[in-house]
Image: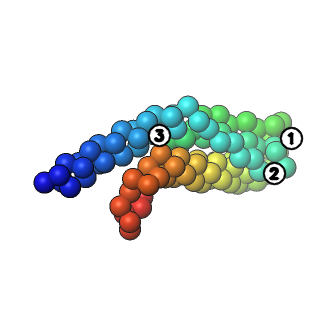
Amino acid sequence: MNDMMQAMQQLQQMQQKMAEAQEALENKSVTEETGGGVVRATVSGTQRLTKLEIKPEAIDPADPAMLEDLVITAVNKALESSRKMAAEDIENATKGMMPPGLGL
């Protein structure tokens, strides 16, 4: 029974550390750019687009598809970076607490 209590305590500690890590991610962000920096997308650690910057030289009325591609690429890069950051933060918060083979 002692092993069961110890396992429950570890689970509670892990849940608390994961909740703290997730809360901290709300205050973190990543920024990615495309087109040599003419389009920049900033995404929070909770995968929310928080800022989109488009320099005037990126806007070509004759080629709106180019700007669309730049925006999509910048946002997708920022989302991927945010997901990686979140996974690393959660992993670091629970390091040594996860049972083998039970990674997130």
Query: Would residue 63 appear left or right of 30 to someone viewing this image?
Result: right
Label 2, secondary structure: give it: helix
Q: Amino acid at mark 1?
A: Glu
* Pointer 3 local density, CA inside 10 Å: few below 14, some 14–19, many at least 20: many
Residue 57: give its label: 1
Q: Mark 3 or mark 1, which has the lower sequence index?
A: 3
Residue 77 placement (x, y as % from top left): 65, 53
Question: Quadrant of the image for the C terminus?
Answer: bottom left
Q: Amino acid at mark 3?
A: Ala
Residue appearing at x 20%, y 55% in the figure: 3
Question: Quadrant of the image for the N terminus?
Answer: bottom left
Extreme residue toward the top, this view:
27
Whether label 2 touches label 3, CB < 8 Å: no
Mark 2 or 3, which is nearer the eye? 3
Q: Nearer the viewer, residue 68 or 9?
A: 9
Residue hosting label 2: 35
Extreme residue toward the bottom, this view:
101
Whether label 3 touches label 1, CB < 8 Å: no
Q: Mark 2 or mark 3, which has the lower sequence index?
A: 3
Label 1, secondary structure: give it: helix
Residue 9 placement (x, y as % from top left): 26, 45
> Does any portion of residue 86 appear in the rendered image?
no
Relative to residue 100, is residue 61 depicted above or below? above
